[in-house]
Amino acid sequence: MKVRTDFICELNQKKLWLRREDLIKEKVKGNKFRKLKYNLIEAKKNNSRSILTFGGAFSNHLYATALSGKINHIKTYGVVRGNEWKEKINESQTLINCVKYGMTLIFVSREIFKKKNGKDFWKIIKLNPSKFYVIPEGGTNELALKGCLEMLSENDYVYDVICCPVGTGGTIAGLIKSSITKQKVIGFSALNNNSLKSEIDKYTDKKKWILNDQYTFGGYAKSNLELIYFINNFKKKFNIQLDPIYTGKMLFGIFDLINKNKWSWGKNILIFHTGGKQGIEGFNKRQIKKGLSCII
Ligand SMILES: *Cc1c(COP(=O)(O)O)cnc(C)c1O
């Protein structure tokens, strides 16, 4: 699959290119398409069992799974973190869309959600795991990595640095695996998780990568005025929409490091726009509720 690459700008003698995974022709955009691709094939092989997965009320992964299920005629189930959401589905555009695409939502408390990998979990939600093709939260598993490997090809060997945002680490792990020795992969963490680095290490022996956690903006889905200003300004300047959860934080980080002369990894930089635009509407709704600035 050929994906468009946009030259953004030259900054302090560094050339920045944006790989537009957010514009692929598939209905499910961005890295979630990559991560689900082989999982969907596997789920179909397994006699079209229903897919069950996990996520928060604004999760791109839940959204992408629901939409993929609809397109591929596979029944989907989504376990949602926080049972308070049961009463206010209409406050999350993500959940509204999941329901619209036919996903059955199962709401559990944050405590139960934490235990989702334990064996008692299935008793609590009163379902039988053998009836489902289960995909972990965020969609990261070996088949997701296989899909993400395809994000990089030999045409990309001209770039000496590869950048992507990091949530659960599946996407960066795929990119690290498919990168070549002269390339360095830099991941920008979108959340605070001390075990993220060792999670990524589980998937690859390669060492030519770095996880930057200076631009999490306080944690998952957290933001500030500076970030929102950057995203809005980026759109004005380059006519490219970034999302506030992942790609906005990464690009903020890249620009900040280069502007402060703290970039020491190479001049030809390929940056992955991993999508995530479905989350903007919900993000703005929460911002308005709090009286804060919106993504325009
Ligand atoms: C899920 C997501 C990520 C993070 O991917 P991981 O494989 O979980 O690290 C990055 N960007 C966007 C837009 C996402 O939706």
Image (cartoon, rainbow, N blue to C red):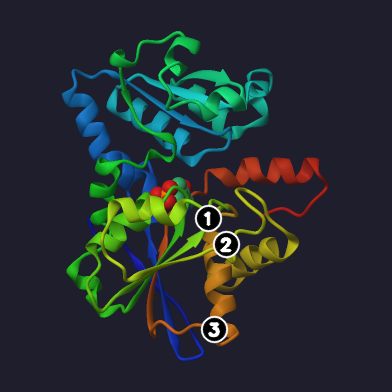
Mark 1–mark 2 CB contact (< 8 Å):
yes
Query: For the residue marked with disc 2, what is the amino acid?
Result: Lys
* Disc marking residue 175: none
Question: Between 220 and 289, which is closer to the camera in this rendering?
Answer: 220
The residue lying at 37 percent from left, 54 percent from top is 200
Query: In the rendered view, does 203 fall on the left or right side of 126?
Result: left
Give the residue at mark 2: 249
Quarter of the figure that contains the C terminus: bottom right
Indicate the amino acid at tag 1. Answer: Tyr
256 with respect to 45 (left or right): right
Q: Position of residue 242 (x, y in %)?
A: 54, 59
Kindly indicate whether the residue at mark 1 contacts the one at mark 3 (C-beta within 8 angstroms): no
Q: What residue do we see at 45% from left, 8% from top?
A: 126
Q: Which mark is residue 262?
A: 3
Residue 86: quadrant of the picture: top right
Query: Looking at the image, is mark 3 or mark 2 earlier in the sequence?
Result: 2
